[in-house]
Amino acid sequence: MIMPLAFGLHPGVASAQEREDAAETVQNVQLIFHLVEADGFTDDDPEISDVVAELRKLFNFQGYRLLSTSILNIGLARTSNVTVGGTGSQRIFADDSETPLAIQAEVSARRSARTVRAKVTLTDVFSRWSLLEASVTIRDGQRVVLGSTRRSAEEPVLILIVTPRIDPT
């Protein structure tokens, strides 16, 4: 299920591009990711207090806490009348985990429509198992829950949220 939500920022670097008309291209898209852990937490996490009510509508957990916030900068290269490109990726280090995760994103953006198309994959770095895959079209600034996953049956549920920001310069 994909659901609009809200959050804050932290930097990372990548590049991704797709063909578009030159008049419609953008130079840079930021994808702001929030990795949230759902478990039996009873204290409120002030860093995600603005989104907990929405998470409670989607999931049936007693508490949520923010594990990681990161920004993936995806540069779009313009070549004459088209934009061409690839993908970007970044590791996420959750505060209390020894095992990093990786986010990979394929992105295109239309400045005139203020929308971003993204295919996002969350992977366990060591096992290389894909934990979550989602393809979405999102408005600039819209917060979306991409989905939830577990690394194993014994571990808590992880929820991945993304907010795109289009840089028209």
Image (spheres, rainbow, N blue to C red):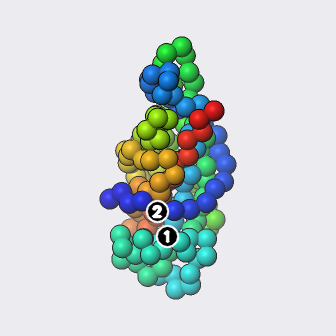
Image quadrant for the N terminus?
Answer: bottom left
How far across and how far down the image is residue 152, in percent?
A: 41, 63
**On screen, 62 above or below 159?**
below
Say what amino acid the circle numbered 2 marks.
Leu
Q: Quadrant of the C terminus?
A: top right
Identify the residue shown where x is 55% and y is 16%.
79
Which residue occupies 49% across, 47% down? 140
Amino acid type at mark 1: Val
Whether the residues at callouts 2 and 1 have beta carbons within 8 Å, the answer is: yes
Q: Earlier in the sequence, mark 2 or mark 1?
A: 2
Q: Is residue 54 left or right of residue 67?
A: left
Seen in the image, is 46 located left or right of residue 64?
A: right
The residue at which mark 1 appears reads as 51
Q: Residues within 10 Å of mark 1 (few under 14, many from 20)?
A: some
- Compared to residue 112, the image places residue 130 above or below, namely below
What's the residue at 61%, 71% (across, down)? 47
Closest to the observer: 67 or 151?
67
Out of 41 and 17, give the one closest to the viewer.
Answer: 17
Provide residue 137's location: percent of width, then percent of height: 39, 44
